[in-house]
Image (cartoon, rainbow, N blue to C red):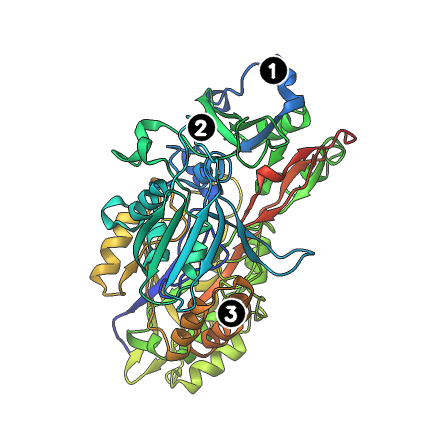
Amino acid sequence: MVTGAPQVVLLVGLAGLVGCDSPARVKPWRHAPDPAAEAAASAPGSHVLADPGGEADVRAARPHTLRIHVDAEPGRLTPLVSPSTWARRITLGTVFEPLLRYAPPDDHGAGRFAPRLARSWRVMPTGLEIRIELEPDVTFHDGHPLTTSDVQFTLDAVRDPHKGISHLRAMLDDVEAIELITSHEVRLRLKRPSGWVLRALAEIPILPMHVYSDSLLGGGALVGTGPWKFVSNKGGVVHLTRYDKYWGGPVAIADVDFVYQPDAAAALTAAKRGELDIIPAMIAAHWPEQASSPGLVAAFRPLQLAPPRLRYLAFNAQHGALDDPRVRHALALLVDRRNIAKRVYAGLERPALWPIWPGGPVDGAEPAVPDFDPKAAAALLESAGWTDTDKDGIREKAGKQLRLVMLGGEKPAQKDLTGPPVKSARDHFIEAARQTGVVIEVRTGGESWLEKHMVDMDIGELVAPKEPPHDKDKPFVPVHASSPREDRALDAMGAAWDPAERARLSGELAAAFGETWPLAGITAAAPQGLVHRRLKNVKIWDGWIDLALLGFDDKAP
């Protein structure tokens, strides 16, 4: 019998981004909150705790009000400081605006940046300076004019490591200084040419300095330049109303209600009564049967938000057996992605390998997802010298058994205790590994436990996520040992000013991953929702809808 201590290193993680691509020196397969998990964690004991308001008032406001189902407590509505997924959805592009906007690929061409608060921008020939001219006559909701001082204040706040805006700060790492030219023109001086800075300008909401200079929380105030202004947050409903002096002209929809309702059945009932226009994501118990019921099909169309979130295994490539890419490749082939997507996630997630797909954490063509292949995995392990010479069912090499440790979050309690145990994605993987001669020990705990043990086990430097975590969901993802080819690919992507060029370069990044196998994707989020047929111009990108483009179709049911 060959013995040996387990070799530390696997982490099951959940990665994601708000944007379609990510800074070159900030790895793009990072952890982000799962709204469904947020909903489960924060749901009150009874749905009556979320009061949607009087039914008569709701019906009276329906002709001019867009109502959106919120399935997780949005928490503090802050645009910059640790906003939850729903806080961002509620405030960005509605109350607050960035300097640029990202226009996804459409009939007019590839993905590109377009004006928002910036009327124009120029990258100077050296690539070390970006000049931005603001739209004239833009005012905040309190009447104060937008100036470059507000832009400088906001960007410098993001760059300040003491402000706690780590999910955005990395994209501005290449900015050396932000200088005012006039009240409507500003200069960004760069340390090196960096296309990621333009991406940052399409994600960072500009705040009024006179409101947020003392605190980025603004004392709870929400004052932006967007097409809607904040009215109230009470009874489980966040209410926005059209800002009549909006610089871009009035939006088509006068009022927007974000309705917090943690009970999915109650939300579906409200939708059938005509009280909701958008249900972003249905739960597994309702999909697909409820979605195809006559009462919903007549009034709703399917909605697929496709948020850029990836569930994956991240390997500690600096220790033990996992320093060999053949072993990491073998483990990747032991992930039965298609079966996991169907049986564990009820079709609400899809098989995925790398964090690369159109609109994904890295925007680009999606590489083929490999089949579950224990035979090929065994061959790779054999080629790496891991064999089962004593026929005890465990592979060994140089007197040590192939035993690994997986770190992960605690497994949620099974809701239906009368049925058979439900296998998780982790269970499927561990079982396949064991049958192939690899023993995996699981160690679980909360986020603080994961943080401590990853440091203790020297798994690597921890990096912050690009998508802001839920207040109680602090992510920790180990940095793998990157390869020169991967570094070159990321550097080339970072130097590309054009998003379409960056998407093209993603193929080289995928090829680099295929050589070193730094991680192994499991599934990508594929929520199925509903959008009312009366809504038109539904445009989806980065896992959400551009609400400013929406309008009501008078001819719809």
- Using a 10 Å C-alpha cutoff, classify the residue at mark 1 as few (fewer than 14 neighbours), some (14 to 19) or many (20 or more): few
In the picture, the disc for residue 506 is 3
- Using a 10 Å C-alpha cutoff, classify the residue at mark 2 as few (fewer than 14 neighbours), some (14 to 19) or many (20 or more): many
Cα distance in 3D space between marks 3 and 1: 50 Å
Residue drawn at (33%, 77%), measured in percent from left and top?
A: 323
Residue drawn at (41%, 26%), measured in percent from left and top?
A: 142
Determine whether label 3 and label 1 are within 8 Å by CB. no
Q: Give the quarter of the image for residue 295.
A: top right
For the residue pair 461 and 442, the one nearer the viewer reads as: 461
Q: Position of residue 503 (x, y in %)?
A: 54, 66
When the figure is inspected, residue 82 is found, relative to residue 436, above or below; the finding is above
Residue drawn at (29%, 48%), measured in percent from left and top?
A: 156
Task: Please name the amino acid that badge 2 sits on.
Answer: His
Quadrant of the image containing the N terminus: bottom left
Tell me the residue that label 2 is attached to.
141
Q: Give the quarter of the image for residue 412.
A: top left
Cα distance in 3D space between marks 1 and 2: 30 Å
For the residue pair 333 and 91, the one nearer the viewer reads as: 91
Regarding mark 2 in the picture, which secondary structure is present there? loop
Residue at the left extreme? 456
Q: Of callouts 3 and 1, which one flags the residue occurring earlier in the amino acid sequence? A: 1
Q: Position of residue 472 (x, y in %)?
A: 33, 40
For the residue pair 231 and 266, the one nearer the viewer reads as: 231
When the figure is inspected, residue 531 is found, relative to residue 443, above or below; the finding is above
Task: Please name the amino acid that badge 1 sits on.
Answer: Glu
In the picture, the disc for residue 55 is 1
Task: Please name the amino acid that badge 3 sits on.
Answer: Ser
Q: Position of residue 360 (x, y in %)?
A: 53, 58
Quadrant of the image containing the C terminus: top right
